[in-house]
Image (tube, rainbow, N blue to C red):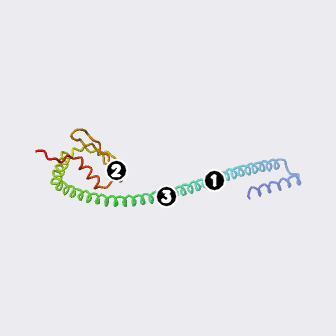
Amino acid sequence: MAAFRDIEEVSQGLLSLLSANRAEAQQRRLLGRHEQILERLLETQDGAEQRLQETLAAEEEVAQSLLHSKERNCQGNAELQQLEAELQRAAEDDARLQASLLQLTGEQQELRELEADLERQERDVDEDTTVIIPSAVYVAQLYHRISKIEWDYESEPGVIKGIHHGPSVAQPIHLDSTQLSQKFISDYLWSLVDTEWQP
């Protein structure tokens, strides 16, 4: 380094001055030059240290910037993966909804066909009952007038209950069809009816 060579020259000059016993003015001049060189050396060292600090700070800043860039890149990759997963889930949901819609459309069509079938059956039943019901009502009313039996329609299954309004007294009816034959029940009920002809 040039500064060290200058120091070496000054040192050798001082030695030669001391050994040769030269003039005091020359000693002062060399000492002044020595001080200047030392000051330059210290300034150069300070400047080098400052540049080194600036370089280290710049390197640290670049390293931090690179680290932040990597973190942002990783974060961007994670967000991209998350968005891809959400897109996949949305596609699966859409496929399920399409399948459900297709199934519901088929069920709706079946219900429409069933409704049309029920309407046809209802029209058929209406046509049949317009003929059957009046005759059935007539037979039921006729049987009630002849037998004078008032039936209890809220009795338990298998139990025949009612009241026979006879000529003098009302008589309760309570028959168990699980223990009695249909012939016996029919004969018993007809035995309650007054079959004498009264003009």
Residue type of the residue flagged with mark 3:
Leu
Location of residue 101 by image quarter? bottom left
- As helix, strand or loop, the secondary structure at mark 1 comes to helix
- As helix, strand or loop, the secondary structure at mark 3 comes to helix
* First reached walking from the N terminus: tag 1 or tag 2: 1
Q: Position of residue 61 (x, y in %)?
A: 61, 52
Instruction: Give the CA distance from mark 1 to mark 2.
Output: 105 Å
The residue labelled by disc 3 is: 80
Front in this rendered view, residue 147 or 16: 147
Q: Nearer the viewer, mark 1 or mark 3?
A: 3
Against 139, residue 99 (above or below) is below
The residue labelled by disc 2 is: 176
Residue type of the residue flagged with mark 1:
Glu
Q: Tell which residue pokes out farthest to the front in this image.
A: 196
Residue type of the residue flagged with mark 2:
Asp
Q: Which residue is pictured at 34% across the width and 60% down the height?
A: 103
* First reached walking from the N terminus: tag 3 or tag 2: 3
Q: Is residue 61 left or right of residue 95?
A: right
Q: Nearer the viewer, mark 3 or mark 2?
A: 2
The residue labelled by disc 1 is: 60
Q: Position of residue 56 (x, y in %)?
A: 66, 53
Front in this rendered view, residue 149 or 69: 149
Instruction: Give the CA distance from mark 1 to mark 3.
Output: 30 Å
Q: How many marks?
A: 3
* First reached walking from the N terminus: tag 1 or tag 3: 1
